[in-house]
C-alpha cells in the first residue's frame, strides 16, 4: 500500500531490503535522544532495522500496528506509524522519526498529515495521541501544525542519561 502526500509517499513495503538504508539514517544519537522511547537504540544497527521490519503487526486479520516508510524523491527519509490501534475505543498512538539530513524540509509534517487522513478516513479512528519530550519543540510544532493539541504535561516521567525529563501529552480528535 502507498499513501501519497504533497512531498512524501508512505509505503508499507516493510521487507528486509530496506534494512541497510534504514539503519544508516536511524543511527544518529540525536534521533535516538529525541524519540522518547527506551526501545529505539543507538547505534541503530542493520539487525535493529530487520527486527523492526519483520515484527508482527496483526492478529486474527486485524492490525494492531501499521508502520510506513517515508520516501521522498525515491529516498527513504524516515518512518511513521500507528501502534496500539484500538478499534473499540477508536484511537491509536502515532510515532515517527526523520533522518537528521532530512530535518526542516517538511517531510514530518507532510507524513503526519497523510497518516492522520489514513487514521480518520480508512481506519475510522476518533483520536490519535502521543508524547513529546520537553526539549523536542520541533516535533511539538509538527504535531500542532497538524491539529494536535497539548492535553497535559507529565513531569519527570522519562529517565535518560541519569536525568529525568518531562513530556507533553498531545492528541488530535477527528
Image (cartoon, rainbow, N blue to C red):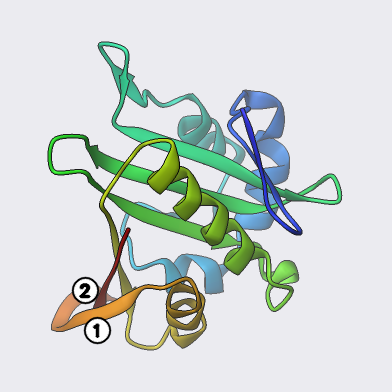
Which quadrant holds residue 94?
bottom left
Mark 1 element type: strand
Residue 165, disc: 1
Position of residue 168 relative to residue 16, above or below, is below
Determine the CA span between mark 2 and mark 1: 5 Å
Which quadrant holds residue 152?
bottom left
How far from the left and from the top, in percent, is residue 122? 43, 36
The quadrant of the image that shows the N terminus is top right
Residue 4 seen in the figure: yes
Residue 163 seen in the figure: no
Front position in the image: 30 or 42: 30
How far from the left and from the top, in percent, is residue 82? 38, 45
State left or right for residue 88 relative to residue 100: left
The quadrant of the image that shows the C terminus is bottom left
State left or right for residue 169 relative to residue 36: left
Mark 2 or mark 1: name the one nearer the start of the chain.
2
Q: Residue at x 32, y 12 (%)?
A: 61
Q: Residue at x 67, y 70 (%)?
A: 100
How far from the left and from the top, in percent, is residue 83? 32, 43
Tell me if mark 1 has few (under 14), some (14-19) or many (20+) residues whose alpha carbon lies within 10 angstroms of its own.
some
Mark 2 element type: strand
Residue 9, disc: none
Q: Residue at x 48, y 83 (%)?
A: 141
Front position in the image: 3 or 41: 3
Look at mark 2 in the image and give the residue it sits on.
Answer: 158
Q: Residue at x 51, y 76 (%)?
A: 142
State left or right for residue 131 relative to residue 51: left
How far from the left and from the top, in percent, is residue 131? 29, 69
Front position in the image: 57 or 28: 57
| Pointers 2 and 1 in contact (C-beta within 8 Å) | yes
Amino acid at each position: 500500500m502507498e499513501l501519497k502526500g504533497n512531498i512524501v509517499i508512505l509505503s508499507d513495503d516493510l521487507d528486509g531490503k530496506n534494512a541497510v538504508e534504514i539503519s544508516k539514517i536511524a543511527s544518529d544519537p540525536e534521533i535516538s535522544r529525541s524519540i522518547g522511547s527506551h526501545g529505539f537504540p543507538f547505534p541503530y544497527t542493520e539487525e535493529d532495522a530487520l527486527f523492526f521490519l519483520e515484527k508482527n503487526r496483526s492478529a486474527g486479520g486485524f492490525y494492531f500496528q501499521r508502520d510506513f516508510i517515508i520516501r521522498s524523491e525515491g529516498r527513504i527519509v524516515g518512518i511513521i506509524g500507528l501502534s496500539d490501534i484500538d478499534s473499540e475505543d477508536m484511537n491509536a498512538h502515532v510515532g515517527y522519526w526523520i533522518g537528521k539530513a532530512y530535518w526542516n524540509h517538511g517531510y514530518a509534517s507532510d507524513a503526519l498529515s497523510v497518516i492522520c487522513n489514513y487514521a480518520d478516513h480508512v481506519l475510522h479512528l476518533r483520536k490519535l495521541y502521543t508524547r513529546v519530550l520537553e526539549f523536542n519543540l520541533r516535533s511539538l510544532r509538527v504535531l500542532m501544525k497538524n491539529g494536535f493539541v497539548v492535553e497535559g504535561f507529565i513531569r519527570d516521567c522519562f529517565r535518560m542519561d541519569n536525568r529525568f525529563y518531562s513530556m507533553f501529552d498531545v492528541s488530535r480528535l477527528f
